[in-house]
Image (spheres, grey):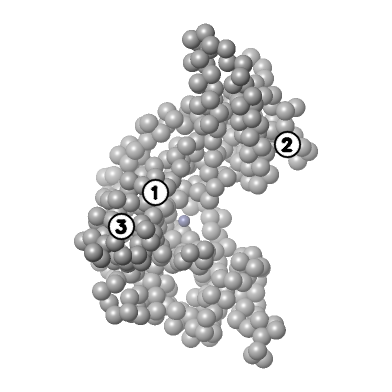
Amino acid sequence: MPEAQENVRVARTDKAYLKVIEKRQNWDNCDEKPFGHELFKHIEGMQRLQASGYDIGGLTERRNELLSGCREDLQKMETLHSPRFLDYLAEFRFPGDSNHGWSGFEAKRKFESLGKNGSNFSKDVLSDKSLEKLIMAHVKRFKDFQVSFGRHNYDLFIYSRRRNGSFLLNFSEDISEKIENGEFLLSKDVLKQQLERFKLITVDGLRSELTSCRDGCFDPDTNTVAITEQEARLNEMKTYTHELFHALSGQALIREGRYKTQKTGLYFTAGETYRFRWLNEAVTETLARQLPVEVFFEDGVYENEREIYKLLQTKGKIPIDKKLFLNAYFENYDHKLPYGERMPEWKKLSAAINYAYYPGFLVKLDNFIEANGIEKTIEVMQRDWTEIAIPKSGILKK
Ligand SMILES: [Zn+2]
């Protein structure tokens, strides 16, 4: 039975693919639990027991453990992403130590005024009692939002910003136009299929500060678009648009026990190896910004990645047509084609980069970014790309 074989690849254009993504949607890879949910559950349990007259003394130790875990996480987030994190905090209401709690805005001001001297989440600033209240309120708020959040509701919510029709309908029309005029090498079947079948969920931005899902993310293994609650409340189409491009980008699926994505757009994964994430994000964000949505795109989102993408197109011996990047981005792996020819567009792009620079340049660039950081890479690309292609100790002399 071929189904049972390991390493079976599936093309997105296959009928069998539909079955695969239906199954994938039932998996639960994305974590939808908010920050502090364990503490919330524990305290709710304690309150129930107490109401029934039980002695809950034995449970307080665990509560304190969970509470100090939350405090540590908040301290970590604060040092990791201070300005953005404070913006998130401004969204919340704080119970505070006084009788009338302070608002998120006041909290932000208070936190900012403390400056860098010590943590805002130390016990001196925020007592255990206040922190507990804060987390309980936060989890409750997120859970309420989660109940009302759904594809239909979110579409209507965003719809208020559009001239007519729903957001997804408008998005689909914009993309169809680009398919028709040959800009996007994407089939209308895949467009329809993906827009009908992706799963949309909301996650807690406060919690995702600790994970890789920032304003939103796309999980190709479960075909799920996740938007953070904080972002969704802002009525923002830009994150949604960006994530939808990830959902539409070409994929290669491999079955290793279960189906896993090996290619999403221009991002490749194999075992522990990850390649070209920056390029994939650069192309995705560039595409999202070109759609005629009435939305203000703030600068800074994958700005450095987009800069390298631009430099990559222009700095070689000859320029590389952006069309080659887009074609490879939308290309789905096709196992019906002869072996070695199953991603012809990716092959064309690789050949063009090799020709404009040096054989294997893209992998070297990827390694260089990993080792030296993206800002340093921009500098070097602007100055002299051969510093990336030919290591100083290299065999080749300039
Ligand atoms: Zn992205």
Alpha carbon of mark 1 to alpha carbon of mark 2: how far? 34 Å
Element type at marker 1? strand
For this orientation, the residue located farthest to the bottom is: 397
Q: Is residue 71 left or right of residue 185?
A: right
Q: Disc 3, ligand 1: is the CB inside 8 Å?
A: no
Quarter occupied by the C terminus: bottom right
Alpha carbon of mark 3 to alpha carbon of mark 2: how far? 47 Å
Q: Is residue 248 left or right of residue 63?
A: left
Q: Is residue 376 left or right of residue 160?
A: right
Residue 178 occupies which quadrant of the picture? Answer: bottom left
Q: Which residue is mark 3?
A: 174
In the rendering, at what x and y percent does residue 35 appear?
A: 54, 35
Q: Within 10 angstroms of label 3, few (less than 14), some, or many (20 or more) residues? A: some
Residue depicted at x 59% and y 21%: 59
Contact flag, marks 3 and 2 (Cβ < 8 Å): no
Say whether residue 290 is visible: no
Q: Is residue 189 left or right of residue 284?
A: left
Element type at marker 3? helix
Q: Which residue is mark 2?
A: 119
Nearest the eye: 327 or 159: 327
Nearest the eye: 310 or 213: 213
Nearest the eye: 91 or 212: 212
Nearest the eye: 244 or 392: 392
Q: Within 10 angstroms of label 1, few (less than 14), some, or many (20 or more) residues? A: many
For this orientation, the residue located farthest to the top is: 53
Q: Earlier in the sequence, mark 3 or mark 2?
A: 2
Contact flag, marks 1 and 3 (Cβ < 8 Å): no
Q: Is residue 96 above or below residue 310?
A: above
